[in-house]
């Protein structure tokens, strides 16, 4: 008897909130801090190295309840970390990935800053896409880019990202009495967008020859 297995994954986001069926650390759904900043503090910026080899030189960190926070003039709060970008002269891209936990995933808002911490541009939400299980966004650097502000997006926190994974099995008998049996199972995972979570940042030179093709 032989068996074949095919796995299909369908993902989507729905604006729902509620109890999660899976176990694991709870997502951070509120910021209860009284010392939030109006502008990011660059003194504790984490440096990301420029990846030059076959393997990515990843900067990994976790945004937690103890991370610094920002507060806008409208009263919206975000937890954040700052990343010091590497010195560069060529065409460089920076990729930011939010890695999911069992029940939650960081809700990112990415802003490029100059050497004084002034915002230069923000990565649009529509450029944040799920690749495998990670929520990923990339941006190319230009002269004057010095820091990356990785903050939580309070407008998305509490929404739920839902992933459905379908597994199909087929069993085929051998011998004179040939027959086939087909079964299917479906698994649904729901992760709540959170103020905190695990983040990976990668800086790498862009292969411009691919753009010319």
Image (cartoon, helix red, strand yellow):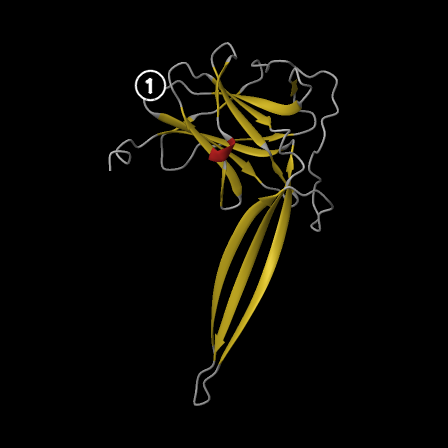
- The answer to whether residue 5 is above or below residue 104 is below
Q: Quadrant of the C terminus?
A: top left
Image spot of residue 176 (x, y percent): 43, 90
Residue at (52, 66) in percent of width and height: 168
Q: Is residue 131 left or right of residue 70?
A: left
Toward which corner of the image does residue 146 lie, by quadrant? Answer: top left
Q: Is residue 164 left or right of residue 147?
A: right
Image spot of residue 111 (x, y percent): 51, 22
Image spot of residue 105 (x, y percent): 61, 39
Camera-side residue: 83 or 53?
83
Outermost residue, bottom direction?
176
Residue at (47, 34) in percent of width and height: 127
- The answer to whether residue 143 is above or below residue 50 is above
Residue at (71, 51) in percent of width and height: 21
Toward which corner of the image does residue 164 lie, by quadrant? Answer: bottom right
Q: Which residue is tagged 1?
A: 89
Image spot of residue 8 (x, y percent): 50, 58
Residue at (59, 25) in percent of width and height: 151
Tag count = 1
- The answer to whether residue 45 is above or below residue 209 is above
Toward which corner of the image does residue 142 lie, by quadrant? Answer: top left
Label 1: state its secondary structure. Answer: loop
Q: Residues within 10 Å of mark 1 (few under 14, many from 20)?
A: few
Outermost residue, top direction?
116
């Amino acid at each position: 008897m032989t068996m074949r297995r095919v796995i299909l994954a369908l993902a989507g986001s729905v604006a729902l909130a509620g109890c999660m069926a899976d176990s694991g650390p709870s997502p951070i759904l509120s910021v209860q801090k009284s010392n939030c900043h109006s502008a990011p503090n660059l003194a504790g910026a984490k440096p990301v190295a420029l990846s030059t080899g076959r393997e990515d030189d990843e900067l990994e960190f976790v945004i937690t309840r103890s991370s610094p926070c920002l507060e806008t003039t409208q009263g919206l709060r975000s937890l954040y970390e700052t990343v010091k970008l590497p010195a560069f002269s060529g065409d460089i891209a920076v990729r930011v990935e939010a890695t999911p936990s069992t029940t939650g995933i960081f809700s990112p808002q990415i802003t490029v800053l100059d050497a004084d911490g002034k915002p230069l541009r923000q990565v649009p939400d529509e450029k944040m896409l799920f690749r495998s299980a990670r929520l990923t966004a990339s941006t190319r650097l230009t002269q004057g880019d010095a820091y990356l502000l990785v903050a939580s997006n309070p407008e998305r926190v509490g929404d739920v990202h839902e992933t459905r994974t379908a597994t199909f099995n087929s069993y085929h008998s051998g011998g004179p009495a040939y027959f086939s049996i087909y079964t299917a199972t479906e698994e649904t995972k729901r992760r709540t967008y959170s103020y905190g979570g695990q983040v990976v940042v990668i800086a790498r030179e862009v292969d411009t020859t691919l753009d010319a093709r």
